[in-house]
Image: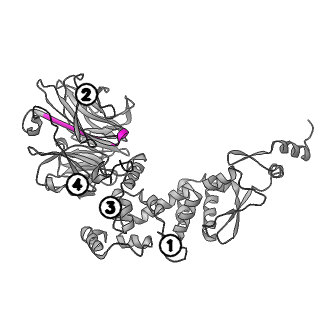
């Protein structure tokens, strides 16, 4: 058997120009395939926060978690050479946390349930504003498991709380009830207040 | 609500608030109505009620399922969360018009309870205990005037049930009456949407008498446990979409007892009077019966109510008892109610409203 030299491989790949990405086959530049075959570091993508800060993250990690990013990569609208994915509604601090979450869950998905849950609890140990930013980001990027985690956390935060506490948690300054309506509520459900 | 971008006082947009609220148990939702006017209008919306109900129902076990019973001591209904600790029960206000009367429960479906008021001339009542709304069901107009109207103390028997026809977003009240002597039973159903009664063809069934007044609604079919010739137990099924009555056979083993809903399927608990005295639980899936692997030691005197997470909950005299699969009593709660006089029902809390109430509809926009 003749040894395939790099050039031959290049030409062969060039002819086909296909590569599996996130479970689908997408056209790719042959140079990248070659790099991948040579065992280069895992493919990265660039995410750009609202503050124009660039974050480099493994493509596989984001594709596994974010439906939006997965779609972008799959339909080819993301060009690895030059593009960065602009995320204008996510600030740097939040984006970093989101990337943290996705990276941890990709690399540690074989961990046992308790360890993962402990990590998640620690991860969500943030103030209200931070939690909302995460929720908005997870909603925008459509990261299902992070969304479910946050919904569950907020749901537990509300359970059994008094009305004023719930208003504080949700930063509701103006509840919109007239003084008479508020009075009526307090009369009807005194144990909620 | 606008999303404030500054570092202080971030407020979640309403779409995300909805996505959180949809997971809350009904009790928390009632409370949440007081948080703000926006939340009140969101939670009171019938679209949200449907979304919330469907979300809860899609889970493996509906977390809003409760046991509701009519207290014999005070004129109120009480609710117990059987999955959680059965020590905590809470009161629900009965509709004002029936608080002074003796009541019984004929059935429940999607958060509504079908109540029967033990007074000559009183209509049946469709009641949502959570929202408090209720609607009367007028009498069927048939000739002669049905004697079930003044039924009490006679050997005639009345039974009924409440079901939901998904194909036309309609609730059906099914009522039947007869006696065990020679009468042919008579069956009718009432459609909430058309506000009228229709007869149900039942000539093809052998003469039966229903022993348990409360029907079980499961997957579009209403089921009753019935006794044939005072001996053999059968199950009568009414398919709501097809408006068709039929009989369902089940495996005979031991003395069959109660018909209860287990994990979204039709289940029967058998008291097996063999040497080891077990409670067997059989589940029907697609018209075939399988016995669940769990067989519980028969704790004498317990009427099984439901089977949750490997524990059996049942009534024993005036107590609600939770029994582990070893037959050991885990928890008990004294309740002022007996299981065998139609004062108890498993129901799912919901915020749903009946179709055509207040001019709105259940599902569609407009009519």
Specify the segment rendered in magenta. B157-169
Q: Check disc 3 and report the residue beneath it.
A: B30
Asked whether residue A30 appears in the rendered view, the answer is yes
Q: Tell whether A37 sits left or right of B338.
A: right
Nearer to the camera, A106 or B106: B106
Same chain for the residues under marks 2 and 4 in the image: yes
Relative to residue B41, is residue B188 depicted above or below? above
Label 1 residue SS? loop
Same chain for the residues under marks 3 and 1 in the image: yes
Same chain for the residues under marks 1 and 4 in the image: yes
Image quadrant in which the C terminus of chain A is located? bottom left
Q: What chain letter is assigned to the residue under label 1?
A: B
Q: Check disc 2 and report the residue beneath it.
A: B234
Extreme residue in the front direction: B367
**Quarter-wise, where is residue A164 in the image?**
bottom left
N-terminal label among 2 and 4: 4
**Residue A102: x %, y % from top left:** 62, 58
Q: Check disc 1 and report the residue beneath it.
A: B10
Verify CB contact (< 8 Å) between mark 2 and mark 3.
Answer: no
Q: Which mark is residue B78?
A: 4
N-terminal label among 3 and 1: 1
């Amino acid at each position: 058997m003749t040894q395939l030299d790099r050039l031959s491989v290049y030409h062969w790949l060039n002819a086909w120009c296909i590569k599996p990405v996130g479970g689908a086959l997408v056209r790719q530049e042959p140079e990248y395939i070659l790099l991948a075959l040579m065992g280069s570091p895992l493919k990265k993508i660039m995410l750009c926060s609202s503050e124009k800060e660039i974050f480099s993250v493994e493509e596989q990690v984001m594709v596994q978690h974010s439906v939006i990013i997965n779609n972008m990569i799959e339909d080819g609208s993301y060009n690895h050479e030059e593009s960065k994915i602009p995320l204008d509604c996510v600030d740097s601090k939040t984006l970093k946390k989101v990337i943290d979450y996705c990276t941890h869950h990709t690399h540690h998905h074989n961990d046992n349930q308790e360890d993962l849950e402990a990590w998640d609890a620690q991860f969500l140990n943030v103030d209200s504003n931070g939690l909302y930013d995460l929720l908005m980001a997870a909603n925008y990027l459509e990261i299902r498991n992070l969304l479910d985690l946050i919904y569950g956390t907020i749901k537990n935060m509300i359970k059994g709380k008094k009305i004023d506490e719930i208003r504080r948690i949700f930063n509701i300054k103006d509840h919109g009830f007239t003084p008479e309506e508020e009075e009526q509520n307090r009369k009807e459900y005194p144990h909620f207040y | 609500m606008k999303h404030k971008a500054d570092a202080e006082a971030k407020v979640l947009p309403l779409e995300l608030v909805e996505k959180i609220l949809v997971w809350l148990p009904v009790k928390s939702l009632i409370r949440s109505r007081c948080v703000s006017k926006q939340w009140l209008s969101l939670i009171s919306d019938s679209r949200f009620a449907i979304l919330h109900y469907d979300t809860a129902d899609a889970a493996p076990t509906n977390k809003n399922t409760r046991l509701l019973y009519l207290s014999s001591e005070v004129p109120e209904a009480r609710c117990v969360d059987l999955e959680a600790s059965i020590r905590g029960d809470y009161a629900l206000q009965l509709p004002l018009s029936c608080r002074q009367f003796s009541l019984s429960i004929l059935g429940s479906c999607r958060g509504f309870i079908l109540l029967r008021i033990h007074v000559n001339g009183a209509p049946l009542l469709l009641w949502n205990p959570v929202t408090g709304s209720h609607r009367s069901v007028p009498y069927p107009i048939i000739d002669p005037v049905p004697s079930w109207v003044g039924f009490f103390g006679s050997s005639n028997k009345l039974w009924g049930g409440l079901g939901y026809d998904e194909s036309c977003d309609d609730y059906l009240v099914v009522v039947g009456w007869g006696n065990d002597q020679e009468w042919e039973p008579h069956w009718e159903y009432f459609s909430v949407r058309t506000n009228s009664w229709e007869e149900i063809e039942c000539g093809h069934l052998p003469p039966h008498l229903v022993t348990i007044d409360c029907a079980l609604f499961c997957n579009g079919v209403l089921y009753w446990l019935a006794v044939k010739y005072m001996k053999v137990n059968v199950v009568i099924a009414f398919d709501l979409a097809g408006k068709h009555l039929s009989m369902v056979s089940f495996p005979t083993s031991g003395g069959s007892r109660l018909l209860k809903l287990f994990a979204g399927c039709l289940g029967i608990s058998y008291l097996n009077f063999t040497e080891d005295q077990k409670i067997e639980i059989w589940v029907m899936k697609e018209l075939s019966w399988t016995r669940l692997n769990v067989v519980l030691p028969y704790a004498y005197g317990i009427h099984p109510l439901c089977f949750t997470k490997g524990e059996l909950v049942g009534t024993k005299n005036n107590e609600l008892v939770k029994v582990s699969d070893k037959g050991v009593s885990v928890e008990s709660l004294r309740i002022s109610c007996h299981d065998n006089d139609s004062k108890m029902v498993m129901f799912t809390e919901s915020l749903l409203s009946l179709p055509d109430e207040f001019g709105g509809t259940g599902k569609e926009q407009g009519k």
